[in-house]
Image: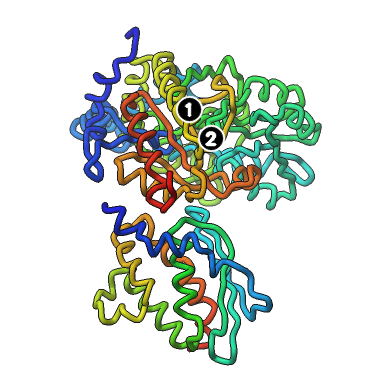
Amino acid sequence: MDLNSIYTELIMEHNQSGHNKRHLDDPDHKERGHNPSCGDDLTLELEFDGDIIKDAAFTGHGCAISQASTSMMIDLIKGKSKREAYNLVDTFIGMIKKEVTDEKELEILEDAFILQNISNMPARVKCAVLAWHALQESIKEDVR
Amino acid sequence: MEKLNVEKIREDFPILNQEVNNNPLAYLDSAATTQKPLSVIRAMEKYNRSSNANIHRGAYTLSIKATEEYDKAREKVRDFINSPSTSSIIFTKNTTEAINLVAFSYGLDNIGEGDEIVVLITEHHSNILPWQMLVQRNKAILKFVYLNEEGLVDMNDYKEKVTDKTKLIATGHISNALGTINPVKEIIEYGHEKGAIVLIDGAQAVPHMKVDIQELDPDFYVFSGHKMLGPMGIGILYGRKEILESMSPFLSGGDMIEYVEEQSSTYGELPYKFEAGTQNVEAAVGLKSAIEYLEDIGLENIKKHEMKLTQYALERMKEIPYVTIYGPENIKNRSSVISFNIDDVHPHDVATILDSYGVAVRAGHHCAQPLMKHLGINATCRASFYLYNTIEEVDQFIESLKNVRKWLGYGS
């Protein structure tokens, strides 16, 4: 195991910056994501403007990987339509499950692409996907 | 044996002699499960090669041999914990099943509306959830006893929580999350004075210290084989004979009956009444061998060795400014479990980073979420030592700890 491929500068940056870790003034939707086996617990807050995700933020606690992954996801989905965001979640979870491996396809994940290495760490997969599952739950009804 | 020779012991545990992530493995998670010596592995192999058959079936030689092996294992357990009778020793799948057996078989019939059950805040989920289910079903009340300033069970709080409505008290002998040794003799005596039944969860105690049932005198005492060098899939329920006799079966079916009619049946005698269906005989054989191994080394020697490691580890950890250690301050109240956190680093990241140095520790809530909430933390890391761990492994653990924060971008 190469720790350098996991605890990268980008992950550390997202873990420590906390720029997405806050409450929204008037969220339209809140979704709690919880990983009972390890205790990671976060709440995603979303503000919509019609079909567009106008703003997003999170609160809660978890390991560096879950915190960074959540922050990267929020940077990625802000300003996107629900459908676009839903597809991004699909691609991300596909990457972590090693179902999507084509780098061209994964480019759309921007910063979050760096989490690809987590797919080689079965013990940490749940940390990486926690927020993405919460987002999926939040918007799945709207994109059916 | 006078003193424990750890180098010699390690020769009996081939699994420990391996590299993990290009470092020697330092297995510091024996509180979760222990490794097996060759003698245990071989005893189970020998049983499967020469004696395996279903017990209590038919008159053929193999079945008789298997039954004898199973009976010998039960007698070994009785002797090990000094139970007054062999029929008070019930084999279960694990500690969890043993507690569930008591909650459902004893509890449903004897603990009713308004009755109270008292547990400690330090309990493992397996000693909370069965009682929660029971009180919800029978409209009883579940009460928690909290810790005092020293991090020990607050005996004043205990004496306040136990009232004349208290029907059952369930406490761990040693906390799996903090390593605290609880004053179970006092807990049992006071509980009995108040007319309550007392169950002790000894999963973290029996592997590490001499437990004498006749001296402690609990009504129920439960533990697991896999935390004491034995295999997974075998647990033990000791129960006071009169109480066990008064209880209905927990699981029902094959091998636990006397007469079976279309609409009703009578049940077998103790201990068979509580052992429905085909049992894990090879695990019982392995458990017997594990007890023999522990007796051969000597529980006193094991205790001395692991407390030497614990004391050394605690001293070295206290030298590191960003490490917080949980649990009792006085080592006399501790077993060989150290729960800790590193400033600014989540326990899961700590465990991943330690793993990259070959060090295996547990991270999480240790199946003790109410305790974590009470302490105001989300999770901890936990290192735990046993007879096969070495001072060198503690050093490897400490040196690895010092590297953790660097990986997360902190100066030191």
Q: Residue at x 48, y 17 (%)?
A: B210
Q: Chain of mark 2?
A: B
Q: Chain of mark 1?
A: B
Pick out the residue farthest to the front: B411
Q: Residues within 10 Å of mark 2 (few under 14, many from 20)?
A: some
Tell me the quadrant of the picture where the N terminus of chain B can be found. top left
Q: How many marks?
A: 2
- Dividing the picture into quadrants, the one containing residue A76 is bottom left
Q: Which residue is mark 2?
A: B325
Circle 1/circle 2 CB separation < 8 Å: yes
- Dividing the picture into quadrants, the one containing residue A29 is bottom right
B311 and A36: which is toward the camera = B311
Q: Which residue is mark 1?
A: B314
**Along the horizontal axis of the image, is A13 left or right of B171?**
left
Tell me the quadrant of the picture where the C terminus of chain B can be found. top left
Please state which amino acid type lies under the numbered disc 2: Ile
Residue B227: numbered disc = none
Q: Residues within 10 Å of mark 1 (few under 14, many from 20)?
A: some
Please say whether residue A65 is visible from this viewpoint.
yes
Q: Where does residue A88 sit, x and y in percent of width and height?
A: 40, 80
B85 relative to B252, above or below: above
- Dividing the picture into quadrants, the one containing residue B361 is top left
Q: Where does residue B178 sit, x and y in percent of width and height?
A: 54, 34
**Along the horizontal axis of the image, is B240 left or right of B87?**
right
SS at badge 2: strand
Of pointers 1 and 2, the one earlier in the residue sequence: 1
**Along the horizontal axis of the image, is A107 left or right of B205?**
left
SS at badge 1: helix
Please say whether residue B56 is visible from this viewpoint.
no
- Colour scheme of the picture: rainbow
